[in-house]
Amino acid sequence: MELRQLRYFVTLAEELHFGRAAAREHIVQSALSQQVQRLERELGVRLLDRSTHHVDLTPAGTVFLIEARQILDQVGRATQAARNAAASTPTLRVGIIDAAYDSMPQILRELQAGHPDLTIHQVEAGTREQYRQLADGRLDIGIGRASQTPPEIASELIRLDPLGVLIPDDHHLAAQAVVPVAALADELLLLGEESQTPELNQFVIELCRGVGFAPTIYEGTVESTRAAGDLVLQHRCVHCVPSSARASNRTGTTWRPLTEPVTHFPWSLLWREATPPPHLQAVIGSARQLAGRLGWLHPREPASPADAPTAISQGDDTL
C-alpha cells in the first residue's frame, strides 16, 4: 500500500467523480483508476461502486475513508515536525557534575566559539544519573570518571586533573607548596554529596587507603564546592578537590596540590554508544583541541620535595 494510493482514494471519495479527482491530483483519469483498483486488490475489498454516470462509496469504503484521512493527516504532521526541527536552532543537552568544575564550561566555550547558533542546556547531575539520562535520551553528552561505564555508554578520557586539598589560609599545611597524602591522616576530610560525586569520593578514599590509612570523614556533606569552602573556612574540615574547582575557592582558603603520590582525577566525556551525530562530534572535537592546547592529558607535576614519587593515578579511564 502506498501513500499516493490513499491520497487518490480520499480525493476520489470527496469528488465522487474520476475526472474531477484526476484533475485535483494532476494525473490522467486512467492512472487514478488503476491506482484505486490496485488498492482494492491489496485490501481484498471493494471500496467504490462505479457506474457510467456516478461513483459511490461502499460500506467498506466509508469506513476506510475515515482511517485513510487520519493516516494522511498524521503523515502531514510528521512531515511538518521534521521540517520544523531541521529549520530550528540545534540544541545540545549537556550533563555537568557541578558548575564549579571548569572542564565542561571551557569545552562549551570552545564549542560555542565555532558554533554560535548552537543552543546549549546544562544539567547538573552525578555521573550515575548522567548514565541514566544518556541512556534514555534526556542528555546528549556528559562528563565524569568513567570507572563503571555501562555497556551502552561510550567514553573518552579528556583530562587528568591534579588533585589537591582545600584548607584555610592559616592552616599549618598552607605554608607548604605541596601536601603529602599521608598528612591527611590527621585531618577531618569532607566528601562531596554522594548523589553528586560518588566517583570522586571513592577516588579520594582509595587514595588515602593506598598510602596506609583510612580517612576520618566529616559527618556532614555539601552539594557544591562553594558550600565546601564555607566549612573549610570555618576550620571544620579540609576538602579534597581537583584543580578544576579552584575557581570557586572562598577568600581565606588555599588549594595545595597533593603529592606522595602526585595524583590526577580522570575526567571523561560520556555519550550513548553509537556513531555520534554531528553536534556531538563537534563537542568531542572541541574537547580534543582544548585538551591538546592546554596540556590536559600531560599535566605538569607540582613542585615537590626531591624524594617525592611522581606516580600518576589515572583511575580506570583509558585513552
Image (cartoon, grey):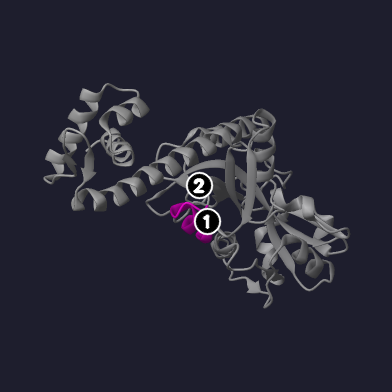
How many residues crowd mark 2 within 10 Å: few (<14), some (14–19), many (20+)? many
Instruction: Give residue 201's quadrant in the image.
Output: bottom right
Q: Nearer the viewer, residue 277 or 31?
A: 31
Q: Secondary structure at mark 1?
A: helix
Residue 261 is situated, as x and y percent measured from the top left of the image, at 61, 52
Q: Which mark is residue 270?
A: 2
Residue at 22% from the left image edge and 37% from the top image edge: 54
Identify whether 267 is placed above or below 300: below
Q: Nearer the viewer, residue 283 or 267?
A: 283
Residue 141 is situated, as x and y percent measured from the top left of the image, at 53, 46
Identify whether 61 is placed above or below 202: above
**Does label 1 or label 2 sit earlier along the sequence?**
1
Q: Which portion, as a residue range, is magenta?
A: 128-138
Q: Secondary structure at mark 2?
A: strand
Q: In this rendering, does residue 234 appear at all?
A: yes
Left or right? Give the position of 96 relative to 254. Answer: left
Q: Amino acid at mark 2?
A: Leu
* Residue 130 forms part of the magenta stretch: yes
Where does label 1 land, which residue?
A: 130
Q: Nearer the viewer, residue 219 or 86?
A: 86
The N terminus - image quarter? top left
Residue at 31% from the left image edge and 51% from the top image edge: 66
